[in-house]
Image (spheres, rainbow, N blue to C red):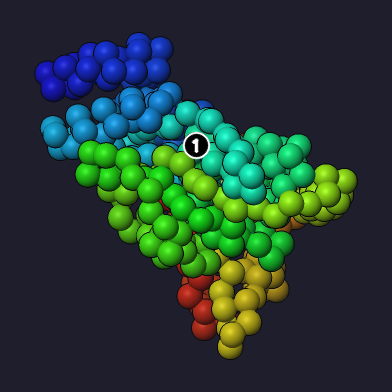
Amino acid sequence: MIEQVLKSYLEHICGAKAVGENVLMSTRTTLKIGGPARFFVSAVSKEILLKLINALNYINYPYRIIGGGSNLLVSDSGYNGVLIKPTFREIVENSNFIYADAGATLAAVTKFARERSLSGLEFVAGIPGSVGGAVFMNAGAYGGQLSDIITMVDILQGGEIKSIDASACRFAYRTSCFQKNRKQIITGVYFFLKSGNKEDIEKRESEILTFRREGSVKKPNAGSIFRNPVINGITVSAGKLIDDIGLKGIRIGGAAISLRHAGKIVNLGGATARDVKALIRLIRKRVSAVYDIDLKTEIEIL
């Protein structure tokens, strides 16, 4: 009975078209894996998101916020609750500052900055996913990370939306406070960029996109599975460690370690979350045995 009432309420808040029942997450993630979410909801505004969270907290019904699904592994049994995807996407410029809603794509923000000759976001060129998800993970590449250019983050907490300073986010390599405190929900981000030359920005982004294409993986994947470990103060590529011990191409079920990039696991067709988790355990065990290093996962596992 509660789920029938909940469905009606979700549709009342968000509109019937924004609410899905038993949505296969294999259709919502880049890895193409995942069982059904009991409810999958698109929140098209902050006001709707606020109402949703308040209602779900009030009835103590499980929910999670997801981004673009590019760094996500969902269980084969799915998620017995409400998965909420913010889809508000406003991007605003104010001098050297850019504000971006959580639902905006990194590609859209990068383009917005480039067109205004604002430099600092070039390193995210080609990274899929949403702003909210990228901030959650403190995404980075080619020597940069989002925390380098974030000044404030808007969050939904305690029934209201407020701004917090970047220093309160406890950003570190591929992590933030939001990973530990799920009650803080990212709704928007403020970036501080430098005035630059549009042609220089385009050139740098083009170079990065070329690098990405050269190492790109065509099969469905969730990006890098592991965080690069730090050994004696030096950051070492997790993919290289995996490659050096001969694990490229190793397969369990429909999942395999990519032949092009050992740091990625690909779906060869029909892969399950169980297959991927088994590969992750195998990789961690082998790397630990050879290097005495405990690899930490970078992807979000639901």
Q: Where is 218 relative to 242, above or below?
A: above
Residue corresponding to mark 1: 101
Q: Is residue 175 visible?
A: yes
The residue lying at 66 percent from left, 62 percent from top is: 144
Q: Is residue 277 left or right of residue 217?
A: left
Q: Where is 28 relative to 265, above or below?
A: above
Q: Is residue 86 left or right of residue 223?
A: left
Residue 295 location in percent, x, y?
51, 70
Circle 1 SS class: strand
The residue lying at 40 percent from left, 12 percent from top is: 17
Q: Where is 71 relative to 180, above or below?
A: above
Q: Amino acid at mark 1?
A: Asp
Residue 1 location in percent, x, y?
12, 18
The residue lying at 35 percent from left, 11 percent from top is: 16
Count of marks, rendered view: 1
Q: Hey, which residue is sitting farthest front in the picture?
A: 95
Residue 246 location in percent, x, y?
69, 69
The residue lying at 66 percent from left, 70 percent from top is: 237
Q: Nearer the viewer, residue 221 or 113?
A: 113
Q: Nearer the viewer, residue 196 or 175?
A: 196
Q: Hey, which residue is sitting farthest bottom in the picture?
A: 232
Q: Where is 5 relative to 94, above or below?
A: above
Q: Residues within 10 Å of mark 1 (few under 14, many from 20)?
A: many
Residue 177 location in percent, x, y?
38, 60
Q: Is residue 253 visible?
A: no
Q: Nearer the viewer, residue 4 or 275?
A: 4
Q: Is residue 61 left or right of residue 256?
A: left
